[in-house]
């Protein structure tokens, strides 16, 4: 397992789809993961330190986990099948360790909220190759992403097709 961090969040210029770029903590390899607009918004809000007036889904999940006396030990971006990434959420409570299947985007949004480490397999970083981030200036991409999300109708979230 290789620890990664969120290096950038932006829009893929070819598909106009949000993409989160993970970078290995002790290296330069990148792993781009295309995500939905709602998850991109949740990640962007946490990265920017913006708090919603009411708890969002990932905030609620954080409260449920801590309320049950558990902690998020780690997030693992565990696999890729048919262009879909898979993740595992590892929770600990007392002397029990629980592994849950999760979407990478939700896992990343939660990890940022609880300050849990994010890991991936070396093979996935190799498959990601030396992918360049979608834009050289993250602030420009963040502005485009914000504009894109603000223009969306809430009904569009249910229509998203990867």
Image (cartoon, helix red, strand yellow):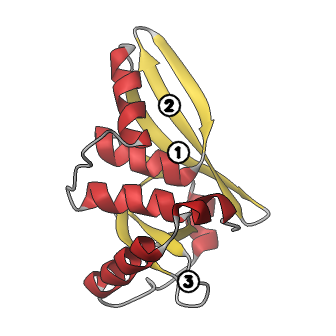
The mark closer to the camera, 3 or 2, is 3
Q: Are marks 2 and 1 in contact (CB under 8 Å)?
A: yes
Tell me which numbered mark, 2 or 1, is placed earlier along the sequence. 1
Residue bearing the label numbered 1: 76
Residue bearing the label numbered 3: 16
Q: Residues within 10 Å of mark 1 (few under 14, many from 20)?
A: many
Q: Position of residue 141 (x, y in %)?
A: 36, 83
Give the label on residue 90, or none.
2
Q: Secondary structure at mark 3?
A: loop
- The CA span between labels 1 and 3 is 26 Å
The mark closer to the camera, 1 or 3, is 3
> Vertically, is 91 above or below 59?
above
Q: Position of residue 140 (x, y in %)?
A: 30, 87
Q: Residues within 10 Å of mark 2 (few under 14, many from 20)?
A: some
Tell me which numbered mark, 3 or 2, is placed earlier along the sequence. 3
**Residue at horizontal 39%, vertical 89%?**
135
Quadrant of the rendering where the C terminus is positioned: bottom right
> Vertically, is 5 above or below 9?
above
Q: Secondary structure at mark 2?
A: strand
Res 26 quadrant in image: bottom left
**Residue at horizontal 28%, vertical 54%?**
46
Q: Residues within 10 Å of mark 3 (few under 14, many from 20)?
A: few
Residue 27 showing in the rendered view: no
Q: Position of residue 105 (x, y in %)?
A: 51, 54
> Vertically, is 16 above or below 149?
below
- The CA span between labels 2 and 1 is 8 Å
Res 67 quadrant in image: top left
């Amino acid at each position: 397992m290789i620890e990664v961090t969120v290096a950038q969040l932006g829009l893929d210029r070819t598909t106009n789809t949000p993409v989160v770029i993970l970078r290995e903590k002790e290296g330069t390899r990148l792993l781009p993961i295309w995500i939905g607009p709602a998850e991109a918004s949740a990640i962007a809000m946490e990265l920017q330190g913006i708090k919603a007036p009411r708890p969002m889904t990932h905030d609620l999940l954080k409260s449920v986990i801590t309320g049950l006396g558990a902690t998020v030990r780690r997030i693992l971006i565990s696999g890729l099948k048919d262009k879909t990434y898979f993740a595992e959420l590892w929770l600990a409570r007392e002397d029990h360790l629980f592994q849950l299947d999760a979407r990478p985007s939700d896992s990343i949004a939660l990890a940022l909220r609880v300050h849990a480490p994010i890991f991936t397999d070396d093979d996935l970083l190799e498959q990601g190759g030396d992918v360049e981030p979608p834009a050289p200036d993250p602030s420009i991409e963040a502005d485009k992403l914000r504009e894109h999300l603000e223009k969306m109708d809430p009904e569009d979230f249910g229509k998203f097709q990867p």
